[in-house]
Image (cartoon, coloured by chain):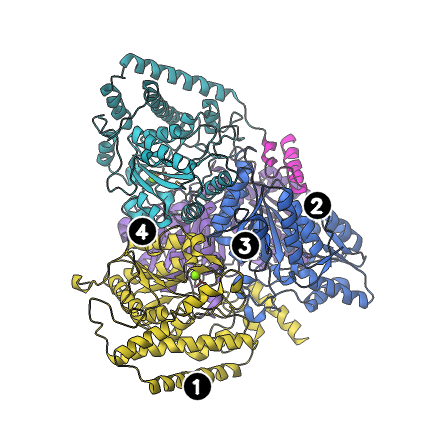
Chain colours: A cyan, B yellow, C purple, D blue
Amino acid sequence: MVQEKVRFQPFSSEPIRLVDEQGRWIAPFEHGLPPEQLRRFYRDMLAARLLDEKLVILIRTGKTSFIAPHAGHEAAQVGIAHALRKGHDWLFPYYRDMGLVLALGVPLVEIFGQTLGNAADPAKARQMPSHPGSKALNVFTVCSAIASHIPPATGAALSMKLRRTGQVAVCTFGDGATSEGDWHAGLNFAAVQQAPAVFVCENNRYAISVNISKQTASENIAIKAQAYGIPGYYVDGLDVLASYFVMQEAIERARAGEGPSLVELVVHRFGAHSSADDDSRYRSREELATERQQDPLPRYQRFLEQQGLWDAQWANELRLEISKALEAALQEALQAGEPDPLEMFDDVYAARPWHLEEQRRLLAEELQS
Amino acid sequence: MVQEKVRFQPFSSEPIRLVDEQGRWIAPFEHGLPPEQLRRFYRDMLAARLLDEKLVILIRTGKTSFIAPHAGHEAAQVGIAHALRKGHDWLFPYYRDMGLVLALGVPLVEIFGQTLGNAADPAKARQMPSHPGSKALNVFTVCSAIASHIPPATGAALSMKLRRTGQVAVCTFGDGATSEGDWHAGLNFAAVQQAPAVFVCENNRYAISVNISKQTASENIAIKAQAYGIPGYYVDGLDVLASYFVMQEAIERARAGEGPSLVELVVHRFGAHSSADDDSRYRSREELATERQQDPLPRYQRFLEQQGLWDAQWANELRLEISKALEAALQEALQAGEPDPLEMFDDVYAARPWHLEEQRRLLAEELQS
Amino acid sequence: MPTMTLIQAINAALDEEMKRDERVMLLGEDVGRRGGVFLATEGLQQKYGPDRVMDTPLSEAAIIGAAVGLAAHGMRPVAEIQFADYVFPGIDQLFSQAAKLRYRSGGQFSAPMVVRMPTGGGVKGGHHHSQSPEAHFAHTAGLKVIVVSTPYDAKGLLKAAIRDDDPVVFMEPKRLYRAVKEEVPTDEFLLPIGKAAVRRQGRDITLVSYGGSMVETLKAAEEMVAAGLEPEVIDLRTVMPWDKETVLSSAAKTGRLLVISEAPRTASIASEVAATVSEELFDQLLAPPLRVTGFDTPYPLAQDKLYMPTVTRILNAAKRLLDY
Amino acid sequence: MPTMTLIQAINAALDEEMKRDERVMLLGEDVGRRGGVFLATEGLQQKYGPDRVMDTPLSEAAIIGAAVGLAAHGMRPVAEIQFADYVFPGIDQLFSQAAKLRYRSGGQFSAPMVVRMPTGGGVKGGHHHSQSPEAHFAHTAGLKVIVVSTPYDAKGLLKAAIRDDDPVVFMEPKRLYRAVKEEVPTDEFLLPIGKAAVRRQGRDITLVSYGGSMVETLKAAEEMVAAGLEPEVIDLRTVMPWDKETVLSSAAKTGRLLVISEAPRTASIASEVAATVSEELFDQLLAPPLRVTGFDTPYPLAQDKLYMPTVTRILNAAKRLLDY
Ligand SMILES: Cc1ncc(C[n+]2csc(CCOP(=O)(O)OP(=O)(O)O)c2C)c(N)n1
Ligand SMILES: Cc1ncc(C[n+]2csc(CCOP(=O)(O)OP(=O)(O)O)c2C)c(N)n1
Ligand SMILES: [Mg+2]
Ligand SMILES: [Mg+2]
């Protein structure tokens, strides 16, 4: 990577921010992005937000059993999605990344199929909602076990390096995940091998109810990169352009063979941890109200306004179009039937051994009787 | 801890060193230690070295099945031992700490009993040699699984804090241990809770055959403390006084309620990893020869000489006295018989459940027949 | 006597033991301010403060490992693992440290601690909120393993576990947390670890189960009774050490043994009980000991109910035994 | 045909597979420059370079987890865990990631990888260099589990494991590494995973074992032969999925089953085989299936030999069966 392209300093004491609260571009360089792409960021953030709202409705109406709201994470997730090469690079996401996988191109029907847990789920409805994945798009199916996807991301990056595929493995996780041993093991090994991986923390300062002050005593998450001899970027994750540009630099750095980095995107979690959570037990409504004032969408709208790219009618139409697409996909997913119970015995192994044949037969008989 | 007592800066780029290669005191403060104590350091380092040599003989003569030589670690280990309050603070050692537990007061007969794996082992000969422990001296019995003792050290420190016992938990490990997830988990939790623990890396730059360059990409081990928001001290562990004074500061800091720290003591490993290892497979003899030039014992002898505390006759007598004590303890340990095989079923639980009674009976019958 | 759900009984047991003994403390993810994701520890941080009811970082190794050190140093920690499925990142602490500390030190150190965890399926949790890993614990010498199925037992056994001098894994079937209420004494009582409960006396067949599957086992028993049979139903409650005496004397009486558990089949507690009974009662059995278990697949969300032993599956197996 | 020790056979299998398929690579602690602490990978880094024979940091989670990612991305990683006892810090990667990746993704992703590990006792290793944790793996759906006992099998099965499309745990009894030499073909051969070997035909009693305990089992069989008996001896070789067919047909023939394994008894592979045979052959058995196993204690250094099934213990159990 050519030196003059390096824009960001790791280990800053303040979060890297390119657009301020008022929507002003405050960076020392030109963004140089075409209007179309700037609008596309808004579109994807809005789609993410509207998807979130739709998921909340699915929970309220009892159509799904679980969701992990991502509202407040949209700028970060859209920034990540646009920084990687879709379908080429690999993404190792976590359960709060619905906005991210959507922006990456995972079809809405698949997302709803996974949410409903019916036959529209390409992964055969074996995991809880909020666990997307897509072989076609190189999205490594989410695993519930926090931080357990970090070493696999390191391994995939290693494979990319060894086979010179020019790909990068981008791996996302929350602030809580950084306390797990596997997080440490994965980053350390990636750093030793200079594997093309970017580790991205969507830091919403809560792990369910646990505030970050009980999670770690470090100044921030980015500084933890010091332990691995890799750069750590501390970024305002409510700023989609900061998220995008820093991610892009980290990804291209990895692609150029200069090794992994850690990117911390500081975000807010507007919802409860999940549909199974009641956050009023541990988080004051005042705190939440203050955070909601910092919503990444209006902030980015102000930026577009300042850039002369905002158009109320366009925005309304966009909202309508996305809502329609969401509803259409949902309806389509709802049509899919229940998965065949006997599918339960598939994919444990490439082929079924005798004991699974026996167990399958037992269930088949039970279902017939 | 009173501010004026703070002598050392964390995160130095060069190792902290108080005595140079020529034995000169180069620190900006007076050591203020009585001659007796300065001589005691030498005595304990020499005892550690002679113990190591004795253990090598036990291996050569087939009297024991395993040893993990500690030669090269003596200055670090004696520094640690003298910095903690013996029998009050807790030590969580690892398998290369024979010199440390000796300096702490674990009786030689127990050390040899453990080494021989006979009835002289107070731990009933259940673990391999190099796994000492002592309830009486608060030495937590070594566990082979690397870094698995870190979270327990954190837990003990937490108990000390919660119950205000004024104790400190000192936990030692090698450079390889820092890659394990449990290492990370233990340090992070201790830091969040400001538990009175001191984590000490005896960095000999090898984990069996794996050079530190394949272990981590960080500048050194001490800097990893940044990830936990605690101080990390980078210290010349061949300098017994640097080891002692830094450890003392870290321990008293912890005792004063100011939280844990990470101390890196850079040492050499003069022997192979263990009696099961052949280090010529991966380490050049030249490298080793260079390291042996930096032997901590002659270096400290030069210091004593410069301080006018060296006396060749005293040193000879010391050597004789220690050798005699070693031999006497070894002979005593050799007298102990084999452990009773049926002891195998004790201490699994506080009392034997039915299945262990049955299994014990089975073996008893077999032994009688 | 008040009636309580299982989760209330857990909460009450913790509360009583914390009141009784200052050394008892709780630690785990979200156990403090939030009172636990299932509210097992609700209200306890307010009552005993953040030092005795401690929210930990998100690390099971830190939780279990710190409990080992706390216990070795003299506390009586009760660690919560948020779901049994998440014990694995911390299992080396349980296996290499907790289980072996007394042994490796020749009895010098010990780790009297409890590791609580919600276990089992039936709540639409998919792979990682449904597993029943008790066989892993029971296969590891040095651990005691309890799986409760009633509020009464939960309270009496949790209190006993906290006072026990060895590490105890205490498993709580999450689908039973709020399933039923029963009378639970408010005054001091303890239940013995290692003792099964005979839930129903009978002479035709012995049904041995524990934990969540007790629900379907008891339902199946009822159906058998309705069909004029007399099943004996045993709830193991402790799976290590399990109560061989009670199981053997029942199986000797009925001659027919069916073991039911929702854990995967291969090398399971059910296998152990079946193998032992066949070894010891070979001549007295009228039919081979059978097992109805969870399948040897990961736990599938979509088949949340079918994965576990259904009443039908239990009855079918029982019929096989009775018709033998 | 050259003769080889077990460790040489492992080395040869790795060498051949690396030569055959560029995607095959090795990773683990000390596997590179040192060639592994048991020298299983000796000479391979010199031959294939540090990228394909990679020394890793000291973290089993990093090793197994990276193998998952390497495999999912298209490589064929062979990970070495230095001792089976040290798999536990990385076991969540094996259980939550490797074992469930195919299932959770509905067949989209998979993890064709091998995790090799020296296993078992008899080398004065105490607690943490002697354990036999195969039951943990077999109890976890999604893993295949092999425990070899001969050089020939080691080569044929390791090659098969590397080519298998699922994660395979490959266990090597360390006390057999250099115990015997046998003829092992240098040309291509594979052995089927899941197929047992009948080591000796007989009709009086079926001895089923695997791994390290095959030594004592075969010795016991010799003594029986000397006493005029005809034991049939089966080496399972694969414990998940184990070869039920071969075991059942032998036990049906002899009517007497003894399962021998040095792993702890409770909820073990031995329990599984015993429970299954008693379930399926109840009427054809002349005596109850018995188990001779390791004890349910941590592995004690001082009783390194007595912990494991001794020839005497096997013979005593066989006598019980034959006298039944
Ligand atoms: C290994 C493991 N332990 C515990 C859990 C339960 N759990 C699910 S989400 C969560 C909090 C995660 O917080 P964070 O990493 O900050 O991500 P966020 O949800 O805030 O986006 C916990 C404890 C889990 N899924 N996996
Ligand atoms: C969990 C675990 N994995 C692997 C091993 C095998 N092993 C024993 S010592 C060692 C190297 C440790 O190196 P380091 O931590 O630097 O300590 P040193 O021996 O150099 O003092 C390894 C890999 C182990 N004991 N525990
Ligand atoms: Mg968070
Ligand atoms: Mg080292």
Type of amino acid under label 1: Lys
The residues colored magenta run A341-369
Asked whether residue C198 appears in the rendered view, the answer is no
Type of amino acid under label 3: Val
**Badge 1 sits on which subunit?**
B
Decide which of tag 4 and tag 1 comes sooner along the chain: 4
Mark 1 vs mark 3, CA separation in Å: 42 Å
- A221 left or right of D311? left
Q: Residue at x 37, y 87 (%)?
A: B317
Q: Do discs 4 and 1 share a chain?
A: yes
Q: Which residue in the protein does label 4 denote?
A: B228
Number of marks: 4
Q: Is residue A348 magenta?
A: yes
Element carrying mark 3: loop
D295 or B121, which lies in front? B121
| Callout 3 touching callout 2 (CB < 8 Å) | no
A142 or D18, which lies in front? D18
Mark 4 vs mark 3, CA separation in Å: 31 Å
Against B36, residue C259 (above or below) is above
Q: Which residue in the protein does label 2 denote?
A: D192
- Would you call the spot at circle 3 few (<14 residues within 10 Å), some (14-19), or many (20 or more)? many
Mark 3 vs mark 2, CA separation in Å: 27 Å
Q: Which residue in the protein does label 3 denote?
A: D31
A300 or C22, which lies in front? A300
Q: Which residue in the protein does label 1 denote?
A: B324
- The label nearer to you, 4 versus 1, is 1
